[in-house]
Each structure stands twice: as C-alpha cells, then as structure tokens.
Image: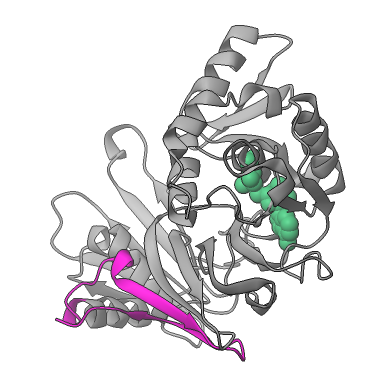
C-alpha cells in the first residue's frame, strides 16, 4: 500500500486562482454576498483566491434570482480535511461528485494521478469551465456532465474512493453500487434543520456501507436535495401570518438549542423543519428571534440577554417548538453526544438511520 498523501501540502502547492471565474462572491460578517471582479480589483481578487475562505462562483444556477449560491470553491482547509478523511492514495480509482471550479479535482489529479480521477458536475456551463481550467493546467481527468446521485460511468470499473462536494439528505445507493468492497465514501450530509455533517462510510462486501460523522462541513445541497424554502421569504411567504399564533413562555435558553451538537441532534428528530434566525440591530444587536417552519406549522422563540424565560409562539396543527424542546431534552438525556459520536449504516436496500455511536 502506498503512503498516505499529505493533503495540506498538496493544497498549498496547487493555487486555486487558475480555477476561479473572473467574478467571485464572498460572504461578509452580516451574511451579505460581496462580489469581486478580477478585471476591476485584481489584487483583492488574488488575495481572496489565496485566502482560506469559501468563494461563491455561481448564483441562481447561472440565471438571475434571489442570489442563492449554487456553485463555489470550498474553503481550502475544509477541502484538505475532507481529502484526509477520504484517504485517496496513488493507484486508487477516485470519483468526485460536484466538480464546481475543478480545483478539488486538480488536487486529486496531482496526488493520485489524473488517469485515476473521474469528476461529475450537473451544471453544463460549470462543467465546461472546470474542464477548461483543468486542461489549461495540464490535467486531464475524466470530466462528466450529469447527475452525480445516479450511477456514474456504469461501464467503468468500480471506484476505490468517492467524494461528494455537495451535501445530500440521503446517501444514494448508486454510490455504493459503484464502489469496490472496502471503498471509502466521504460526503457532506444534512437535512432541512441542520446541514453540518461530514460523513465517512466504508463499503462492505454485502452491498451495505457504514461509518460515522467525522467533522463539520456545511456544503450547498445537491440540486435535487435542496431545502424547500431556500430563496423564499420566511416571514410573509413560508409563514404567511407570523402574528397569529399561540403564545407561551419557556425557560429553555434558545442559545442552548443553537449549540452546534444540539442543533445536529435536534435535526435528526425534527427533520422536516427549516429554521432562520434574525438578529436585532444597534442596542438590540444581541437579541434574536429564531423562526421554525415546515410549510404548514411554525414556531418562533425570542432571545434577549439577561432574560431567564423567553416568549414562544406556535401556529398550525403541529406544535413545532414543543417538538424541538422534546428533541433537545432527549439529546441531553442521551448524554449530549457530539455530532462526531453519531454514525450511519446504509443497508443494501438503502435504509439509513443516523444513531449515536456511544452510550453513556
Ligand atoms: C461546493 S460546489 C463544488 C466545489 C468543487 N468541488 C470545487 O473544487 O470547486 C458544489 C457543486 O455541486 C454541483 N452539483 C449540485 N448537484 C449536483 C449533482 N446532483 N450532481 C453533480 N453535481 C452537482 C453544483 O452545481 C456545484 O458546482
């Protein structure tokens, strides 16, 4: 077996600039998308290309709309962490899903050999630009355009490593079908409530795959796994009448509900609910309200510093806040397992449930 690849070293030695489009966007501290055009601000653009930040490279699937990021160059430190988890080595046949800019595919080409790398992108324009960028750097992996959730390149031999650079809500069984026994699959994983899991699975002889969450990775969802309410106005659209609801009080501090591992665990138990948090401004900058909605029912909770109980409002047939509070209580009762103390088995039939791997 060849030695493990020093992915940090490969990332450092492979500049991102040649793979980025002329205009990139980054998110400022207030969550606004700021565009930087290489033609107008070359130094700023170069600095961003070299920085450890995620850069959006396409909005709204290349059309115009609500400015939802639909393709990006991920943060280099996260890219290196994911490749470490993948443990691709020279000689492995590697499949990447979500080519994006082509930079991650370039890293794979540099480390395992371009003839071993296949990459697939759903967006034809993005795929074309990535192939051009890769070829301009002398790298010729197999570049495919299409849905990476389906069986990719079915006539080719199975893969030793599969890495997705888009999040999924369910692991496609096609990935397992296209893997050799012993193959490693690394993918960002999330649901409507929480999108923060980096999942690493190992494929077994019987067509199942098991593994656990190995870190935090918030990636854009694969096209057909996108959240229902992204790009929609939460208040007034998803929740048409936010003033009409049943008001109660809770002693449960909303900050505890937001803690990253609690948030992950609640998402497993209340998976169809999306959430948005809005902060106050000026003297109220530390105050926030979180809204939760499933399309029919909704809830909100208000936080103010120093308060010991908080207003909750719930509307619709489902008591969404009560479900969230019960999910939080169940997680505390289980000993507050961290995200990385959860695992998953995908059976040969495609069943998949996330469960804590530890019992306390
Ligand atoms: C975060 S970007 C990928 C970053 C990329 N690996 C890089 O190095 O720049 C996610 C990409 O996944 C693509 N994508 C979304 N759904 C897909 C699918 N079902 N199959 C293949 N690609 C998909 C998006 O168009 C987007 O370009």
* Residue 258 in picture, x, y percent from top left: 31, 60
Give the quarter of the figure containing the C terminus: bottom left
Specify the color scheme.
Answer: one colour
Magenta-drawn stretch contains 104:
no
Q: Position of residue 116 (x, y in %)?
A: 69, 50
The answer to whether residue 134 is above or below residue 18 is below
- Residue at figure coordinates x 23%, y 62% from the top left: 256
Q: In this rendering, would 21 be left or right of 199?
A: right
Q: Residue at x 64, y 62 (%)?
A: 237
Residue sitting farthest toward the front: 1
Q: Residue at x 71, y 42 (%)?
A: 114
Residue 238 in view in this figure: yes
Q: Considering depth in this image, is 142 or 91 the residue closer to the camera?
A: 91
Question: Is residue 72 something one can see in this rendering?
Answer: no
Residue 112, position as x, y percentages in the image: 60, 44
186 versus 354 height, above or below: above
- Residue drawn at (65%, 40%) of the image: 109
Instruction: Name the residue nearer the viewer: 9 or 91.
Output: 91
Q: Nearer the viewer, residue 270 or 253?
A: 270
The image shows a total of numbered marks equal to 0
Residue 342 lies in magenta, yes or no? Answer: yes
Residue 214 left/right relative to 68:
left
Q: Which residues are magenta?
A: 332-360
Q: Position of residue 19 (x, y in %)?
A: 69, 29
């Amino acid at each position: 077996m060849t030695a493990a690849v020093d992915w940090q070293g490969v990332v450092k030695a492979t500049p991102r600039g040649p793979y980025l489009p002329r205009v990139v966007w980054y998110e400022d501290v207030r969550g606004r998308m700021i565009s930087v055009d290489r033609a107008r601000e070359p130094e700023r653009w170069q600095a961003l290309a070299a920085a450890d930040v995620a850069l959006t490279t396409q909005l709204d699937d290349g059309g115009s709309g609500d400015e939802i990021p639909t393709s990006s160059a991920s943060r280099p430190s996260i890219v290196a962490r994911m490749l470490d988890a993948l443990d691709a080595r020279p000689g492995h046949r590697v499949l990447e899903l979500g080519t994006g800019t082509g930079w991650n595919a370039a890293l794979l080409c540099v480390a395992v050999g371009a003839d071993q790398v296949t990459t697939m992108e759903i967006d034809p324009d993005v795929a074309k630009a990535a192939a051009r960028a890769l070829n301009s750097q002398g790298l010729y992996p197999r570049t495919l355009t299409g849905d990476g959730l389906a069986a990719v390149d079915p006539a080719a031999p199975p893969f030793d490593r599969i890495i997705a650079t888009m999040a999924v809500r369910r692991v496609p069984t096609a990935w397992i079908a296209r893997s050799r026994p012993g193959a490693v699959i690394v993918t960002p994983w999330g649901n409507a409530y929480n999108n923060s899991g980096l999942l690493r699975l190992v494929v077994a002889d019987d067509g199942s795959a098991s593994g656990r969450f190995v870190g935090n990775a918030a990636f854009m969802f694969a096209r057909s796994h996108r959240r229902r309410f992204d790009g929609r106005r939460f208040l007034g659209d998803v929740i048409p009448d936010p003033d009409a609801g049943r008001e109660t009080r809770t002693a449960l501090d909303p900050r505890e509900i937001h803690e990253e591992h609690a948030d992950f665990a609640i998402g497993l138990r209340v998976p169809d609910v999306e959430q948005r948090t809005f902060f106050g401004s000026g003297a109220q900058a530390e105050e926030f309200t979180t809204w939760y909605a499933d399309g029919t029912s909704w809830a909100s909770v208000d936080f103010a510093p120093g308060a010991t109980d908080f207003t909750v409002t719930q509307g619709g047939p489902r008591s969404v806040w009560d479900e969230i509070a019960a999910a939080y209580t169940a997680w505390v009762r289980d000993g507050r397992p961290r995200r990385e103390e959860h695992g998953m088995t995908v059976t040969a039939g495609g069943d998949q449930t996330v469960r804590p791997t530890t019992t306390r």
